[in-house]
């Protein structure tokens, strides 16, 4: 870690920890908790889109699988949150790989539509399998996590703390991964799959690895979301959510770990900030995206990369 | 250290009706520089694509003898690279947006093993050693090819000659047994060609076997130990550089039919 | 109602919605063919087509018997209006990002989609708006199988437009330039083709088609909502990819096929699983033919 | 832009978030959460007008809580459960909020009710009719509309006894409300011996239902029951008419919207029936001046405006009786309030918080207008 970045990393971490203490307003903390949740999702999607270069338009499905895994484990078998966390991550990771098998056989935008298809299929399956998933009514009464004697309850502060820890750990792992041998292999596959193949990199395996890892992180986020909400319904995991997480990754700066986190915070806080404009909220939100892409096409923290000469 | 390293038997490849390779057979001995020459469209690059697993031939066998006898037929391109065959491309395929050093480091992928967990929490001692080895090997190769100064720059920002050398360094980074070079001298200035020939001789000294595709006879003839000539997908001649230069069929294929007496 | 008639009725149902999907899919495919952009805002252009038609009908006040006349006027308004909208969107949002990485333009498209959707919500109000039924609600075809005049109009107009589009693309100078730019923009520019003009033209034509699709959709289903663009846009994009993104006949085939799939899926299996069936078939098609039904295989060679 | 500059930029973007709102003169707020964007925005806005009218009239009669300015804190949940939870937490966090009137869709009311319960905040729900919500055992939850476990059976009895239907096909719009109501109707209809030909869901926002209606035509039922909202219902009616499907049509309270008739097109809605929560607001004597006042101010009377008006008044009454700015006091005042003579009738709330008004109205469409049947 180059000291400069280490300093910045510590500064951000300190600020994030202090916030809930200096400003106890639960509403603000809830926004921060939601922002941290989106940051976690953005980090996961960043591995798939940023590292491996796979345009995934169905990420909400993996998030949903994590959430429903915990909900079902908890409601059917009374499994505790802490045990369910890795299981949800695992399930979503496996689903990411299984959904990926057919997807990696197609290229570019076709992959986008296949993943989009999966996003819709998973959501509709959760809506229709009523006896298991409670159908459109979703699942209710999901237990809040209990840490020793402390029950997380409805207040957002403990979730915020948990999410900050998860985001910090994931960000650190992603930063390490990006510079590692696997990170280089992913970027090679992203740039020229054939050349990477001739250098001994099994492109399909690398892609599946990225999908599995991205799925794992979505699963963790899903598990925390289900615990925080207490009630999950299929329509909160729709295509719009997948697109929003993608927008956070791209807006933050594709491939850049800090950029993706900032992108998530900005895009999840913006609707709340614009809440005063109520009816005009989404209108300004759309405008914000257009302007930001116009000002910084490569994203806030993206490296300004000139397009390869054709 | 003699004997054949690469054995090609009756290799045939068709694209629809076009026969790109027609029953081609030849051998490359260990520690030798063999060249593959022939007019454009003779099937040279197609042969490279078959050997490196990018294309699957309809017929024929390709065997890598050397340390272990292996049939290359069914292998995918990444498996071919793992058994020690590295290649460069006719039109350069570098990872443009990655730095020169990163490009060469990707070459060492085959020789290192660190997975996802290792990358995040490198607890195995072997990983540290391998990382140091890879970085050291990459830097040495860059120095050898006079690319030390541009290690940190994105590959796409380099001159044509430099990019050729980066691709060469990247292929060598995987410490291969057999190196397939697809027109390495194309587009190089005169002095760069001399440096390339010297470098190839150095590699040969170090025991590396090279299979070369090249048009420039001034590069092929002085460097090669053995030359194979392809025309319209078929092998029309094979032999030492001297024999090939006098072979009637080769001249005819290159310069067209000898008109009477001219 | 004998099973045979039931099947025929389902086919008709499928083809009606399929024709609308095809019209919009053409817009997706043309834009993708030219600048490789998945134009998320295209669904909203379709929706605006139906709202432009609504505006014409509102101005017309009580629709007398001259229903057909108003329909023609609405068709022209939607065509011109949407093509202008397409030009404006391309000029403001996409042209400055011509050199930007592909994914950034995708986000801009999403931004435009949010913008247009909410602009219409604020302009026309959030609740569903009623589009007067222009043609008499008579039902052709005796017995069980029924076809309404509006379905006839949809088939006719969409067929006409598809043939017309083929004519433009393969018959006119602009069409030739479009195909050239799609193949290789750099080479096209070297040949003196103003690529910006061609791209603008593509957006204009694609948006006009979507506008007509939107109008027909609005009149046929008689209730329009600012949110319609999202779902139909998603389906039309699926159809465009199924047929082979970038390939015009592919878009038409994909649209009709997806309409049939939904019609038969909902009719014979269950409407809850309708969308799942459509997407499962799409994924199977892409597995067998990775470039869509009519997409050409770009062979990857070293 | 150096990266530190970018950090400052992002901090600026977030800073308004933490600027606490200025503490002007003492304020008491009633939280009001409905969908103001998304496809349910129309209902949301009608309800907002009802609540604002109630507030206006209450203030005209003098301060509800002496020394405090009364405000309506309106928030949008856009029919999205996650946003509903976020809005609920915002209100729970705002000390000035003493009661909440809200959420239209059951999928939003359910998670939000847990948060209001945690915050000991009085939660008056105008119109989410899913029965499960009041079974969560929250003492802060009060609902002024009959629940689906009443509306479903009432519709079933009406269909079978009065209309003599015995071959029924059930459709719903796969939402928490629609599926819940459809299941209740199904249970009741099966227990009274009617034959259920099938139960399917349609996707909200879809327009083309001809395939499923054609399938239904093949089964030739004598009644179709639809639990959902009026946009989809209008389309079902229109396409049913086009396929000249003879079966009668019965719907839930989501259809009770004048726009249904013209959206379905001329004649398509003729002869259809629907159940409503409570009677016809226009016929209810105690609601006359509300209807007049509402239509004078806003013109078109929405389906749920009266419920929002009633809900807001109940919350105001609880605050007035509590007499001081304290949530627990407002809660106890609400529990002691045995009866509340509202415009919908006299409400007495049972242990679970549901109203005693259980009348389910039946309407039909006759020559283009809603007509009250019983």
Image: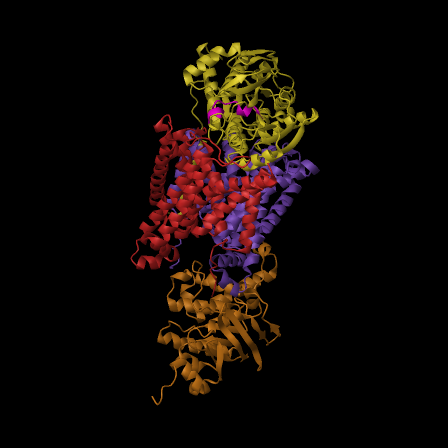
Is A205 positioned to the left or the right of C176 in the image?
A: right
Q: Residue furthest bottom?
A: B261
* Residue D84 in magenta stretch: no
Chain assigned orange: B
Number of numbered labels in the structure image: 0
| Residue B12 percent coordinates (x, y) | 53, 73
What residue lies at 45% left-to-right and 59% top-to-bottom? B98
Q: Residue furthest left?
A: C192
Rendered position, A16 above or below B107: above
Chain assigned red: C
Q: Nearer the viewer, residue A152 or A100?
A: A100
Name the quadrant of the C terminus of chain D.
Answer: top right
**Chain A on-screen colour:** purple
Magenta span of residues: D250-262
| Residue C107 percent coordinates (x, y) | 43, 44
| Residue A165 percent coordinates (x, y) | 56, 42
Q: Quadrant of residue B38?
A: bottom left
Chain assigned yellow: D
| Residue D302 percent coordinates (x, y) | 48, 21
Q: Nearer the viewer, residue C143 or A41?
A: C143
Q: Nearer the viewer, residue C142 or D107?
A: C142
């Amino acid at each position: 870690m180059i000291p400069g970045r280490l300093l910045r990393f510590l500064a951000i971490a300190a600020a994030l920890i202090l916030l809930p203490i200096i400003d106890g307003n639960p509403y603000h903390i809830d926004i921060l908790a939601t922002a941290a949740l989106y940051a976690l999702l953005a980090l996961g999607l960043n591995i798939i889109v940023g590292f491996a270069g796979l345009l995934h338009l169905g990420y909400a499905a993996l998030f949903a699988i994590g959430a429903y895994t915990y909900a079902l484990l908890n409601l059917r078998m009374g499994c505790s949150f802490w045990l369910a966390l890795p299981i949800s991550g695992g399930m979503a990771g496996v689903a990411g790989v299984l959904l990926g098998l057919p997807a990696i056989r197609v290229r570019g935008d076709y992959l986008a539509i296949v993943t989009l298809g999966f996003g819709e299929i998973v959501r509709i399956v959760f809506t229709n399998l009523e006896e298991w998933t409670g159908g459109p009514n979703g699942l209710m009464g999901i237990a809040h996590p209990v840490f020793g004697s402390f029950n997380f309850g409805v207040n957002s502060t403990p979730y915020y703390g948990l999410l900050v820890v998860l985001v910090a750990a994931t960000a650190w792992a992603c930063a390490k991964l990006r510079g590692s041998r696997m990170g280089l292999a992913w970027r090679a596959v992203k740039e020229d799959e054939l050349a990477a193949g001739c250098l001994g990199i099994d492109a399909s395996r690398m892609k599946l690895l990225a999908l599995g890892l991205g799925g794992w992180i979505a699963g963790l986020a899903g598990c925390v979301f289900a615990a925080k909400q207490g009630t999950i319904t299929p329509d909160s995991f729709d295509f719009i959510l997948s697109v929003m997480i993608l927008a956070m990754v791209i807006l933050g700066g594709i491939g850049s770990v800090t950029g993706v986190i900032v992108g998530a915070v900005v895009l999840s806080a913006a609707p709340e900030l614009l809440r005063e404009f109520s009816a005009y909220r989404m209108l300004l939100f759309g405008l914000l995206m257009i302007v930001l892409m116009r000002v910084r096409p490569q994203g806030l923290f993206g490296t300004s990369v000139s397009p390869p000469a054709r | 250290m003699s004997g054949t390293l690469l054995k090609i038997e009756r290799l045939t490849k068709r694209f629809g009706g076009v026969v790109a390779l027609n029953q081609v057979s030849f051998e490359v001995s260990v520690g030798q520089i063999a060249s593959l020459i022939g007019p454009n469209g003779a099937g040279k690059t197609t042969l490279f694509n078959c050997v490196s697993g990018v294309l699957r031939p309809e017929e024929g066998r390709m065997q890598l003898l050397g340390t272990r006898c292996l049939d290359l037929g069914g292998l995918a391109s990444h498996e071919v690279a793992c058994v020690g065959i590295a290649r460069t491309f006719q039109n350069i395929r570098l990872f443009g947006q990655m730095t020169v050093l990163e490009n060469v480091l990707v070459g060492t992928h085959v020789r290192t093993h660190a997975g996802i967990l290792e990358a995040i929490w490198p607890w195995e001692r072997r990983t540290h050693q391998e990382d140091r080895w890879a970085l050291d090997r990459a830097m040495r190769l860059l120095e050898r090819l006079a690319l030390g100064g541009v290690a940190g720059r994105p590959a796409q920002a380099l001159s044509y000659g430099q990019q050729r050398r980066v691709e060469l360094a990247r292929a060598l980074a995987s410490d291969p047994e057999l190196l397939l070079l697809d027109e390495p001298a194309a587009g190089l200035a005169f002095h760069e060609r001399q440096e390339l020939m010297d470098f190839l001789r150095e590699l040969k000294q170090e025991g590396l076997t090279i299979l070369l595709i090249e048009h420039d006879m001034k590069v092929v003839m002085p460097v090669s130990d053995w030359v194979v000539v392809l025309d319209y997908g078929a092998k029309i001649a094979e032999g030492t550089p001297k024999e090939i230069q006098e072979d009637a069929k080769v001249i005819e294929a290159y310069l067209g039919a000898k008109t009477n007496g001219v | 109602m004998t099973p045979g008639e039931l099947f025929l009725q389902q086919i008709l149902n499928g083809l009606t919605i399929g024709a609308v999907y095809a019209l919009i899919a053409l817009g997706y495919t043309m834009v993708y063919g030219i600048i490789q952009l998945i134009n998320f805002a295209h669904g909203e252009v379709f929706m605006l087509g139906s709202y432009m038609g609504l505006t014409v009908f509102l101005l017309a006040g009580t629709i007398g018997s001259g229903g057909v006349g108003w329909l023609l006027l609405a068709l022209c308004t939607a065509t011109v209006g949407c093509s202008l909208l397409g030009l404006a969107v391309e000029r403001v949002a996409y042209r400055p990002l011509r050199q930007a990485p592909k994914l950034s333009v995708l986000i801009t498209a999403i931004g435009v989609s949010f913008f247009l959707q909410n602009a219409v919500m604020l302009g026309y109000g959030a609740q569903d708006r009623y589009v007067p039924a222009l043609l008499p609600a008579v039902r052709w075809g005796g017995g069980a199988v029924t076809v309404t005049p509006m379905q006839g109009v949809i088939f006719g107009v969409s067929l006409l437009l598809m043939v017309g589009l083929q004519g433009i693309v393969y018959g006119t100078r602009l069409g030739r330039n479009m195909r050239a730019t799609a193949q290789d923009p750099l080479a096209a520019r070297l040949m003196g083709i103003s690529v910006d003009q061609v791209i603008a033209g593509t957006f204009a034509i694609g948006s006009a088609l979507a506008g007509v699709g939107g109008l027909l959709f609005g009149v046929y289903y008689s209730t329009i909502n600012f949110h319609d663009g999202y779902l139909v846009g998603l389906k039309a994009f699926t159809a465009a990819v199924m047929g082979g993104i970038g390939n015009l006949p592919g878009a038409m085939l994909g649209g009709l096929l997806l309409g049939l799939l939904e019609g038969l899926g909902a009719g014979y299996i269950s409407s809850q699983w309708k969308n799942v069936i459509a997407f499962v078939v799409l994924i199977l098609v892409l597995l067998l033919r990775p470039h869509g039904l009519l997409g050409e295989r770009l062979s990857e060679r070293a | 832009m150096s990266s530190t500059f970018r950090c400052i930029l992002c901090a600026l973007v977030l800073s308004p978030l933490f600027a606490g709102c200025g503490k002007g003169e003492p304020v008491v707020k009633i939280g009001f959460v409905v969908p103001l964007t998304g496809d349910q925005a129309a209902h949301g806005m009608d309800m907002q007008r009802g609540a604002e009218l109630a507030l206006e009239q209450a203030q005209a009669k003098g301060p509800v809580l002496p020394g405090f300015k009364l405000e309506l804190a309106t928030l949008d949940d856009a029919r999205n459960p996650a946003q509903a939870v976020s809005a609920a937490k915002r209100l729970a966090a705002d000390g000035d909020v003493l009661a909440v009137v809200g959420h239209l869709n059951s999928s939003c009311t359910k998670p939000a009710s847990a948060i209001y319960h945690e915050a000991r905040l009085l939660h008056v729900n105008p119109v989410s009719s899913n029965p499960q919500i009041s079974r969560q055992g929250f003492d802060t939850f009060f609902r002024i509309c009959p629940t689906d476990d009443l509306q479903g059976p009432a519709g079933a009895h009406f269909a079978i006894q009065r209309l003599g239907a015995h071959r029924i096909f059930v459709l719903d719009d796969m939402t928490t409300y629609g599926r819940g109501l459809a299941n209740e109707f199904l249970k009741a209809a099966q227990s009274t011996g009617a034959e259920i030909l099938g139960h399917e869901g349609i996707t909200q926002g879809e327009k083309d239902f001809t395939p499923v209606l054609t399938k239904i035509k093949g089964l030739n039922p004598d009644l179709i029951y639809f639990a959902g909202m009026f946009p989809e219902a209008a389309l079902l009616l229109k396409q049913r008419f086009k396929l000249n499907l003879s079966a009668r049509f019965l719907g839930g309270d989501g259809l009770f919207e004048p726009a249904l008739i013209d959206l379905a097109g001329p004649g398509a809605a003729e002869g259809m029936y629907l159940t409503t929560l409570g009677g016809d607001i226009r016929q209810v004597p105690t609601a006359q001046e509300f209807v007049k006042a509402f239509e004078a101010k806003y013109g078109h009377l929405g389906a749920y405006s009266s419920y929002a008006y009633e809900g807001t008044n109940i919350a105001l009454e609880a605050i007035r009786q509590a007499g001081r700015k304290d949530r627990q006091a407002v809660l106890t005042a609400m529990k002691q309030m045995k009866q509340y003579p509202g415009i919908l009738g006299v409400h007495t709330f049972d242990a679970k918080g549901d109203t005693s008004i259980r009348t389910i109205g039946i309407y039909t469409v006759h020559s283009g207008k809603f007509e009250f049947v019983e």
